[in-house]
Image (cartoon, helix red, strand yellow):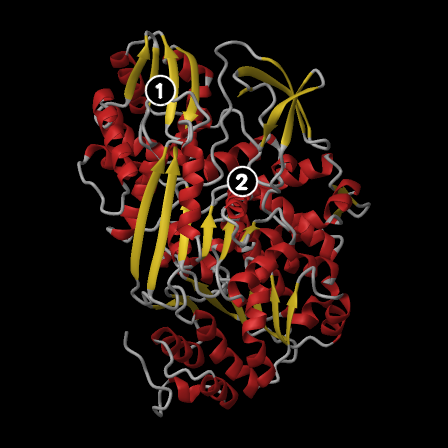
Amino acid sequence: MKRASPGNAGDAYSLLAPFIREYIYEKKWETLTNIQEAAIERILQGDDQVLIASGTASGKTEAAFFPILSLLAKNPSDSVGVLYIGPLKALINDQFARLGSLFSRGEIPVLPWHGDIPGEYKKKFLDNPAGILQITPESLEALLIKHSRKTALLFKDLRFVIIDEIHAFMGSDRGDQILCQLGRIERAAGVRPRRIGLSATLGDYGKALRWLALGTGGKAVLVHEEGQKRQVRLRLDYFNRENPGIGDRYYRELYGQCRGKRCIIFTNSRLEAEETIARLRDLAGQYHEDPVFHVHHGSISAALREEAERGLREKEGPVVIAATATLELGIDIGGLDRVIQIGPPAGVSNLVQRLGRSGRRSGKAEIYFTCSEDNEKGAADDTRIPWALLKTIAVIELYLKEKWIEDTPVKPFPYSLLCHQTLSFLSSHGESSPRDLARHILSLPPFAKIPGEDYRELLRHLLALDYLEKTEKGGLIIGLAGEKLVNHYSFYSVFPDEEIYRVIQEGKELGKIHFIPPEGTNLVLGGRYWQVKGCDLRHREIIVIPGEEGGERVWRGSRGETHSRIVERMREILAEGELYPYLSEGARIRLNEGRARARELNLTEDYFVPISPGVFFFIPWLGSRAMRTLAALFRHKEIRKRLCLNFCSREKEYIFRITSELTVPELRNRIASIFNQGIPPEYAAGDIPLTDKFDYLLPPELRRKQYTANMLNMEELYLRFGRVIS
């Protein structure tokens, strides 16, 4: 990589404030990175929004802060001058600790604002706002509500907004919440700060640039570098843990992979992280070795998470942490010897983030993947295809061979967030006429496509539910139910809380689920069908009665979204004969077994697999959105009638099990005919689950419209079904 010497006059280094140049000298940095050179010049010599996109450990944070601090040092702000928004409190703490000496050297005030910061520091800041405010979207929402009268004073001289890890925000309610917050701040304080976005994981720079510039009236420019080229060492192993004794061998192999090393073990669930660490600690006891194992996820205390982070960052010797996505982002955890991934990554972007945690200093990244038959469990799948292994290979191949990263889909109708921001605005500003409220809220960037009539319908519904109240003058204020909601700390976040719901039949608990099924639908639990009669959200209980045989099964899907390109690559892997060099012997054997089984079932050529007379698997090789759309179609009464469906359920992420009176050729022709004739949009909605946090406050038609636009993908079915079916 080309480097520029800080000693060369006229380069970016010479544009920096003296205290920053001293900081670089004392850190004994011989060079600025290319990304820092480019970003410093772009920020200091332009007025556009700037997206800084480069690999991990390339100095993106310094690339943003060095020029901004130089400007602040030369001309101090009369209020908050820089608003830094990060996705995690831990990331904010990390940035504060890492750059604290730089801030103090330049005599620039900085305050991390979150629940662990003492109130006295916050009060002092509110009385005399200046410098840099580091905050999460949730804490910023609380600040705008609780201290609404000070918004103009706090941000009257706001010059820059730094949004870190913007890929974690784009396409989500949380990202749209940030755009709303910035719009409200700019309007209240009369400012137009420049936005600086940071990311190491982006598929489409164009989308990121457009997102960053939304609501600014200007454009965003890209400062981009691939980052350091690192050698990547991969190994993918496979275990059939259902066989006697294999489970123990699996954990001993996993222990050997992290023995004496500094590792993060990424899992796809919190339970899996807990179980993995418990088994590894047991093995450490058997081997009479130190139990250097920790857990890191959102359900454990902040103190335990910080202890685990300090272990990797500060301690010498081996440290192993099992984590979910909480350690994907840019928290400084020092040098790692290896990253371990249990089960398939949710997508290529997850792999890029996790791989980026290893090899930062050595330039050599190591990642060990392990899949097991346990990853296949949970459905009556007679295909005997190693789906988890296939997905892992597909993600690796798409990254290594094609450098492909999935894009983040946009939500055109975020009605749940619209409800949230309406209540937040009224809580902050007090009474507002319906016209003024609509003018303020619908002008915020995320709501640009929402018709005025839809907003009026939402306001009428909130009035009926007592979340809003109309005054004698015709204005709108927060109602009693709304006050109770807004005054609870959970209101500040817009992502759904991860809650577990107990399934109850006649007072007896049958099991637990992680979603709220629509009333009247059926679900499968304990090998039986149950019809949902009601939901007691207060006690987190789903009330059911025995369901009828043949009723459809509610399937909410995995929490991650799988892109159709990944599923299509899985199909290609089954069809081709390549044996990938990173596969262990066990993985090669299992892949070959899967390929042989696919040939036997003709899986890569035909999408219907007969199981028994009248019973079929339907495997259309589509991603989560398209499969969710098919599931909704198959639940529709008219579609079921035309396909003569007696039973249809999602057995896995990729498979439907169908019972029909038709033969395979007849099914194929009927499905092709349905799509050739065109499908009314309302057919693809069916029973609407609660997917976003405030969906329960939406009128049914708006909830249906939101779900259809944001969660389904009829266009992909029209584009692909001619090829898939015919």
Q: Nearer the viewer, residue 149 or 379?
A: 379
Residue position for label 2? 275
Residue position for label 1? 382
Whether residue 276 sits left or right of residue 396 in the image: it is: right
Q: Residue furthest left?
A: 577
Residue 571 visible: no
**Residue 443 image offset from top left, x and y in percent:** 56, 55
Q: Residue at x 42, y 27 (%)?
A: 244
**Residue 224 image offset from top left, x and y in percent:** 34, 67
Q: Residue at x 61, y 52 (%)?
A: 441
Q: Earlier in the sequence, mark 2 or mark 1?
A: 2
User: Would you place residue 204 above or below residue 63 in this image?
Assistant: above
User: Mark 2 packing: few (<14 Cα in 10 Å), some, or many (20+)?
Assistant: few
Q: Quadrant of the N terminus?
A: bottom left
Q: Label 2 vs label 1: CA separation?
A: 27 Å
User: Would you place residue 682 above or below residue 392 in this image?
Assistant: above
